Amino acid sequence: MSSSLKDVALRAGVSPRTVSNVVNGSAPVAEQTRLRVQEAIDELGYRPNLAARSLRAGRTGIIGLAIPELHSPYFAELAGLLVDEARRRSWTVIIDQTSGDPDAERRLLTGDGGRVMDGLVISPWALEAQDLTATAGTLPVVLLGERSPGGLADRVAVDNVAAADEATTHLLERGRRRVAAIGLQPHLENGTAQQRAAGYRRALRRAGIEPRAAWERPVTALHRSDGARAMAELLDGGGSVIGDGGAVPDAVFAFSDELALGALHTAHARGVRVPEDLAIVGFDDIEDGRFSHPGITTVSPDKQQIAARALQCLADRVYSPRNTLPAHDLTVPHRLIVRGSTGGPGDGGR
């Protein structure tokens, strides 16, 4: 015989309303209480009657997640964390890939004329914030990433400028003076590469080093092959100037760990020792970077917090009458994890 909401409340020692708040995410609940309720839910195998709840509330219990690339290790890990958070609220997640295409982003926001989602979490690469909110209409939307919503929608992001500054400063503190950057994307308007480039340049100038435009290598995408190609260009003399003896970089800040892994591959193939001849820092803290040789020093965004805060923002909007809450612009923490690619711990920093 299936358990009821009242059974869960009795087991957890709380009121049925508290259980409902945990299940629906409709009101804040103290973390210790939420964990106790979740434990009771798991023990009793309680499953809410989604159909009845949807009929009463006019909601489907389905949310959307739109990410640019399903095959990206970073977005794949983030999607998994978001699904875990949604499951705690008894939400079902529909995941779609936009490939940074504006029409794909619009299609998800409009639901192709028939709305089945209660809300949408989206990492936009193409549409401006004004376009996103105008297209979505009354659909609750939470943005992930660097595109500033200008107070029009909730956003959860990392401080890319500060993070890139920290990564570049780490290289400078290791005694590197010829620091290149791999990952500029002038063809995109989502702001990620621009912000990381700004942080990179700020750190160099603070150290009295004028950035070289030729050492800021653009890429089509943030993948391993792009990083390998850009590293080859730098080692072949891309960015050398008259009077510097044809010098090549002694350090690289890559705007993603995939780019860093590609750069590492090219360095190995060319006989360039890492970190002795070339230090490398990446961004994202993907699993591959922990098990490469050497391990990749990286900026690690708090992905768990990104997922938790995004889903809390969405829940607040879904359960707010007429979706009238003021927009939140939330910045999650990051940290620099030092591994072998910059002369850190030899175990890869796992």
Image (cartoon, rainbow, N blue to C red):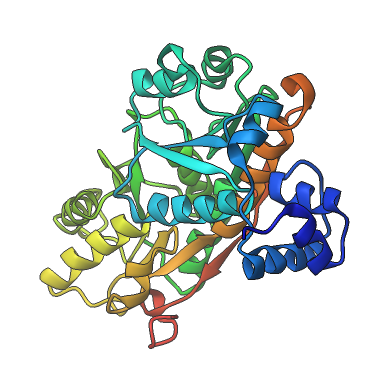
Inspect this view and state whether residue 70 appears: yes
Residue 177 image offset from top left, x and y in percent: 41, 64
Inspect this view and state whether residue 270 appears: no
Q: Quadrant of residue 125?
A: top left
Q: Is residue 9 left or right of residue 132?
A: right
Residue 63 image offset from top left, x and y in percent: 53, 35
Q: Quadrant of residue 150?
A: top right
**Extreme residue toward the front, this view:** 1
Label count reads 0
| Residue situated in front as seen by the camera: 143 or 59 | 59
At horizontal 31% and vertical 61% (from top left) the residue drawn is 260
Q: Is residue 290 above or below residue 38?
A: below
Where does the N terminus fall, quadrant-wise? Answer: bottom right
Q: Is residue 165 above or below residue 213?
A: below
Residue 113 image offset from top left, x and y in percent: 44, 11
Where does the C terminus fall, quadrant-wise? Answer: bottom left
Residue 56 image offset from top left, x and y in percent: 70, 28
| Residue situated in front as seen by the camera: 140 or 263 | 140
Q: Is residue 322 left or right of residue 177?
A: right
| Residue situated in front as seen by the camera: 245 or 322 | 322
At horizontal 32% and vertical 66% (from top left) the residue drawn is 250
Q: Is residue 244 left or right of residue 281?
A: left
At horizontal 63% and vertical 17% (from top left) the residue drawn is 138
